[in-house]
Amino acid sequence: MKGLTDIAGIRVGHASDYNALTGCTVVLCEPGAVAGVSVRGAATGTEEIEVLSPYHVTERIHAVVAHHTEGDQALLEAILDRVK
């Protein structure tokens, strides 16, 4: 396997805004996948990370969004609308 997209059902997309020095990466798994997370450090800025807890009712996830800007709320909402 050469990369993440070699796995059947996984799609990855990325967009960069070099003027604003920001970007966004989305990993889609349309059939769903079991996921876990390890959050380290202070002020991580995670959103909806609790759905990955083993105590949460969510059994599978369908997307992971990684970005690095507080002003990306509209972008996140557009991605969530698209994934749903």
Image: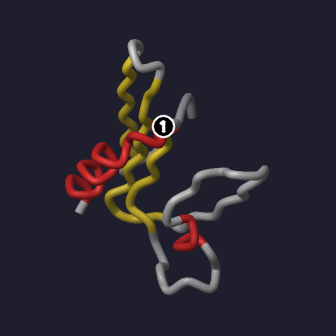
| Camera-side residue of 15 and 27 | 15
Residue furthest toward the right?
A: 41
Q: Quadrant of residue 61?
A: bottom left
Q: Is residue 67 left or right of residue 41?
A: left
Q: Quadrant of residue 27?
A: top left
Q: Is residue 42 left or right of residue 19?
A: right
Q: Quadrant of residue 35?
A: bottom right
Is 75 placed above or below 63 here? above
Image quadrant where one finds the N terminus: top right
| Camera-side residue of 15 and 45 | 45
Circle 1 crowding by C-alpha within 10 Å: few under 14, some 14–19, many from 20: few
Q: Secondary structure at mark 1?
A: loop
User: The residue under label 1 is which amino acid type?
Assistant: Thr
Is 59 placed above or below 15 here? below
| Percent of width and height locating residue 7 | 46, 45
* Residue found at x 63% / y 64%: 36
* Residue found at x 49% / y 78%: 59
Is 53 placed above or below 33 here? below
Q: Is residue 33 left or right of residue 31?
A: right
| Camera-side residue of 83 and 34 | 83
| Percent of width and height locating residue 66 | 50, 43
The residue beneath circle 1 is 69
* Residue found at x 23% / y 63%: 84
Q: Is residue 5 left or right of residue 34?
A: left
| Percent of width and height locating residue 52 | 57, 70
Residue furthest toward the top?
A: 19
| Percent of width and height locating residue 77 | 28, 54
